[in-house]
Image (spheres, grey):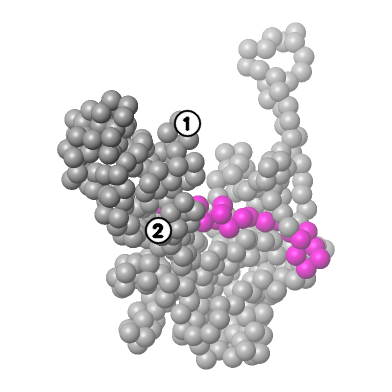
Amino acid sequence: MFVELHLIQNFAPHCLNRDETNSPKDCEFGGYRRARISSQCLKRAIRTSPVFMQELDSEIGVRTKLTMKLLKERFLAEGRSEEDVNTILEGFVPLTIGALDKGNKTKTLVFLSNREFDVIHDTLKDNWEALVGKIDGKKNVGLEEELKKLVNQCKFGDLSPDIALFGRMMAERPAINVDAAAQVAHAISTNRANMEMDFFTAIDDLQTDSEMGAGMMGTVEFNSSCFYRYSLVDVNQLMKNLKNDRGLLTRTVKAFIKASVSAIPTGKQTSMAAHNPPSMALVVLREKGQPISLTNAFAKPVAVFGSEDKDLATESISRLVKHYADVGKMYGTDGVGFAGLCMIGDLDKDTLSSAGVKEYGNMDQMVAELLEAFNASIADAA
């Protein structure tokens, strides 16, 4: 079972996601250059969105190299000796999570829920006196053996919703890897991308009238594009990751959809303020069969040049819905338990009817009816 989300989002001039040369990311699709926003960028925007946290009303995981710092602060707050804390953590963290660098940071980012941090803390706390007893200057005879015995007591897997959605890969501890339940495509522009350049200058406030020229100058690349965004949630995988907690499952799906709609990457926003919400959201509950991306609706770029009666967002929406209808005719729609659309503006009713999509006046109404159908589907599947 899958919940699929298709978005059309038209951005004003922006540089939301840059590559290593500070240029907006792009790619070639259908033989044409397109603007692009990476899936990593979108996933972080979703995971850190206030909407995501508010909807879940629970603690979100922590992705960091500063595991040692977090654990050390807890033990020091309990009045432990800093020397003992450093010795024990420097031995235990590499065994449970991964190797440390010279600055006592993990060499790779670690993604753990707060409850999993509690497991590490509580395991060491419960055995603290025995571990301290093994500390003998720099020899620490038997400490490593004691720490190895405790590794299996650290039962990871009490996941936060974001880890359950986006997964976890830890090469040094494959036993605690988590298969992601969410799949997020790179957003690509429905139109042909035209990269532009902004030349800027900055004035030195203390420069005298007799001094000529700017205090600094430079260039910033940007573009203005209408994006097709596609993502989905593998409901069965999410249920497994959340240990069959159906209430949390429903809240997590709702949070993912609402956060996906509201989240916008932060790149260059202070100088461009491209806060443009999606013009359309199409949500599909696919009870059986394979998920289907509608990217090929834009294999030929949408073009509105020379026409005052068309706009890029509306034409992109029309193209998307028509392609959804065409795909349904070819492959059937037996597995579709819900298909709803919410958009800014109007769409030809015949187009919607042929696609078998119900139009909603607002997002809250559409999400509510989706979740009603979703809960009925998972109840039937039980």
Residue 176 badge = 2
Magenta stretch bounds: 28-50
Q: How far from the left and from the top, in percent, is residue 180?
A: 47, 64
| Residue under the image location 61 percent in, 41 percent down | 268
- Which residue in the structure is indicated by mark 1? 102
Asked whether 31 falls inside the magenta stretch, the response is yes
- What secondary structure is found at the residue carrying circle 1? loop
Residue 67, quarter of the rendered image: top left
Whole-percent x, y for residue 253 in the image = 41, 68
User: Could you tell whether 35 is left or right of 106 in the image?
Assistant: right
The residue type indicated by label 1 comes to: Lys
Q: What residue type is labelled 2?
A: Ile
- Can you give x and y, in whole percent of width and height, for residue 347 in the image? 61, 76
Q: Looking at the rendering, which quadrant does residue 239 occupy?
A: bottom left
Q: In the image, what residue occupies the spot 33% across and 57% down?
A: 156
Q: Residues at badges 1 and 2 in contact (C-beta under 8 Å)? A: no
Disc 2 on helix, strand or loop? helix
Residue at the (55%, 64%) spot, across then down: 184
Q: In the shown orientation, is residue 101 left or right of residue 317?
A: left
